[in-house]
Image: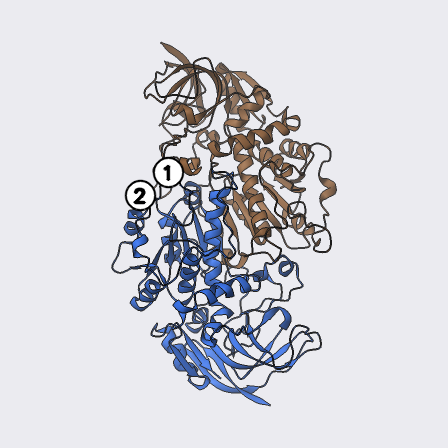
Chain colours: A brown, B blue
Amino acid sequence: MSMKAVVFRGPYDVGVETRPKPAIRDPTDAIIRVRLAGICGSELHMYRGIQKTGTGHIMLLMGVHIEGHEFIGVIEEIGSDVNKFAVGDEVVSLFSPVCLKCWYCKQGLTNRCVEGVAFGTQKLDGGQAEFVRVPFADGTLHLVPPELDESLLIMMCDIFPTGYYGASRAVEGLLTQHQSPLTSFRDAHSTKVSLKGQNGHTNGSTNGLTNGQTNHHTNGDGPFDPLGSSVVVCLGCGPVGICAITTALSKGIKTVLAVDSVEDRLSEAAQVGAIPLNLSKHNILDEVMSRTQGRGADAVIEVVGNPAALKSAFELLRPCGILSSVGFHQDELPFTGLDCYLKNITMNFGRVPVGTVFKDALECLKENQGALKNYVTHELSLDEAATGFDLFEKRVARKVVLRV
Amino acid sequence: MSMKAVVFRGPYDVGVETRPKPAIRDPTDAIIRVRLAGICGSELHMYRGIQKTGTGHIMLLMGVHIEGHEFIGVIEEIGSDVNKFAVGDEVVSLFSPVCLKCWYCKQGLTNRCVEGVAFGTQKLDGGQAEFVRVPFADGTLHLVPPELDESLLIMMCDIFPTGYYGASRAVEGLLTQHQSPLTSFRDAHSTKVSLKGQNGHTNGSTNGLTNGQTNHHTNGDGPFDPLGSSVVVCLGCGPVGICAITTALSKGIKTVLAVDSVEDRLSEAAQVGAIPLNLSKHNILDEVMSRTQGRGADAVIEVVGNPAALKSAFELLRPCGILSSVGFHQDELPFTGLDCYLKNITMNFGRVPVGTVFKDALECLKENQGALKNYVTHELSLDEAATGFDLFEKRVARKVVLRV
């Protein structure tokens, strides 16, 4: 039996082709009849043909394969070892299989699952197709929650958890710095704030502009609010950036400076509550310094994935600042060991453990769905996939989904 | 009035000269009559003449100045704004003044105090002299605790807090990873372990060698011990490395692999409880992999401060590992953005906030003084400073102090 699928054939060349319908290969597999598939920004690296490899790392992402690591659908068939799901279940998939059995999965470090090859690569066909085979279905799939519109739910495959993780690592870093006896004179317990379920921000009620002059010297009598008094920069306001900004505000950061060069993206950033700064109109360093008494940002969330963004992230941070990077970097680091030593920097890099944060991220998305409900700007048919990639690559579309 | 002082005159050239006795300059100053001064490893960068500067950073460390940022003595004179101390008090100094008034000091980030120029540089004369002027005495000095021998107390000026911080940041990173809902499936509270005051290790009772085969798959019924099951590498077993190893073991890490190429240093590392690995005899990567089921170290403490050590630290870490670097780095980072992304690494760099960790580090040193009591191998007179630098630079001495 055959099916239609969006096939990557080379740089700037994707198209719908007829392919064999996938079958169960391992007993932990499930076959999904796809209903909705997203086009993700991380696919553009490949689409543009600029996927590089590091010394000693083999990445075979350029070969012909079926695109797509964001998809929602109905279970068509399951293997004999799938225990959590039944045929007919409506499910949403993570961007990469999660085996739940390896050492990393058992810890919760599902981002380094030893079976974790991404969908939509030469190693594992993706979900921009009528059907897709999902390995380790029990770890990789989640039941569709009834409360969320499908066009928002598609964000849960990758971009919302990725933005959620980028922002939450920054928040976690700031809280740790403020609570740890290693870096704070405060009682390690008096300002304890739970990372989970915190909601210091009412989304949509302010545009955030009035928060720019927050007083950072509230070391006196009142209770100190380490998140509310922090200035956080988000570099990049594409889909992941918007998700990161939404999360940061939701977790109690009051001042998020959102940096991009695309006006439409900056408008969206302002709408969810950030202070928009256009790279081509503002001196970003001056803007950050003027809001921090000349110190620099307390944390920077970097979602862009190029050396210019990483260099900017480093320069915008205050000494002892937190750099949370979820961008996909392929180049040399644009700062030296001396820079790191002198800035006393704390950094984390890499992809989200999406299996681990899925539930908390989903709660955050539900709470903020009002602000994000118009986020998908283009819903096309599977046959129009080439147009969808083109629109997204040219930044005409915020987010494109394909109806199968 | 004049005094004797150890003067840095150029690479490999220090000597005792007659200098004017320092006087109170600012009302927050104190003048200390020095009794004991240490020679610190970080002075060797300068001594060897290999202090570099980064682009845009001005470091004037090479000029003629009085050496020494480790000293203990008696207060000879105080300025009108010194409130915590009186003439005659016995005090130990931090390696760098702490004003307690700037934004960083108020947070606890005393490592970035805006007044924090180090003693023993062209900007601030050091304590290898009969007298030394101490700026911001209230923040920079601590009363000599009665319980500790002077030759151990001199370690509190710099090397013990530095090693303590390097190890504690690694421990903090591991605990955070195991407790955070972002990176762990565990209940965020069930395995809560306080960073402060924890003592999972009885020093001296084992040499640590029997801990190398710790089972890392204790995910079953028993309580999970995130620190006891971790494998931590300390790169560098000089004075700071020994302090870091002592701290890591004291905080509940059971397996510390200590890496160096100097046998005497490795003997000391083994004596305090680490597993010694000689760079010139062992394949360090194989040793780490064999103890971690091929994953790599959970955390690496890097105290050396050169690119080879940093490269090794990166390579020895498992995915999602913690790199805690307190080495003074002056070169390019020996790994790329792609490396960082693929390893999902968490890193922190830079000097210790010594004002913040002083009390906790002192408690840790007191608890472990038995293991470290013979650490100072050479006590010389001030007049023999040149010999002291030479012995230390050639790694003949573990630690040299000068009796004034």
Q: Is residue A281 left or right of residue A22?
A: right
Q: Is residue B312 above or below residue A26?
A: below
* Distance CA(mark 1)–CA(mark 2): 10 Å
Q: Nearer the viewer, residue A94 or A355?
A: A355
The extreme bottom residue here reads: B1
Characterize the local packing of mark 1: few (<14), some (14-19) or many (20 or more) Cα atoms within 10 angstroms.
some
Q: Secondary structure at mark 2?
A: loop
Q: Which of the pair A184/A248 is nearer the observer?
A: A184
Task: Tell me which corner region of the image, top left, top right, bottom left or bottom right, holds residue B258.
Answer: bottom left
Residue ID at (57%, 21%): A151
Residue A351, above or below B144: above
Secondary structure beneath label 1: helix
**C-beta proximity under 8 Å, tags 1 and 2:** yes
Q: Looking at the picture, how far across and down is residue B93, in whole percent? A: 55, 72
Q: At label 2, which amino acid type do we have?
A: Gln
Write down the residue under mark 1. A103
Picture quadrant where residue A58 is located: top left
Compared with A108, B134 (above or below) is below
Q: Which residue is identified by label 2?
A: B293
Where residue A292 is drawn, which disc sits there? none
Which chain does tag 1 point to? A
| B101 lies above or below B399 | above
Give the image location of residue A29, x and y in percent: 37, 21
Amino acid type assigned to the residue bearing label 1 in the image: Trp
Quadrant, the N terminus of chain A: top left
Q: Position of residue A23 (x, y in %)?
A: 34, 16
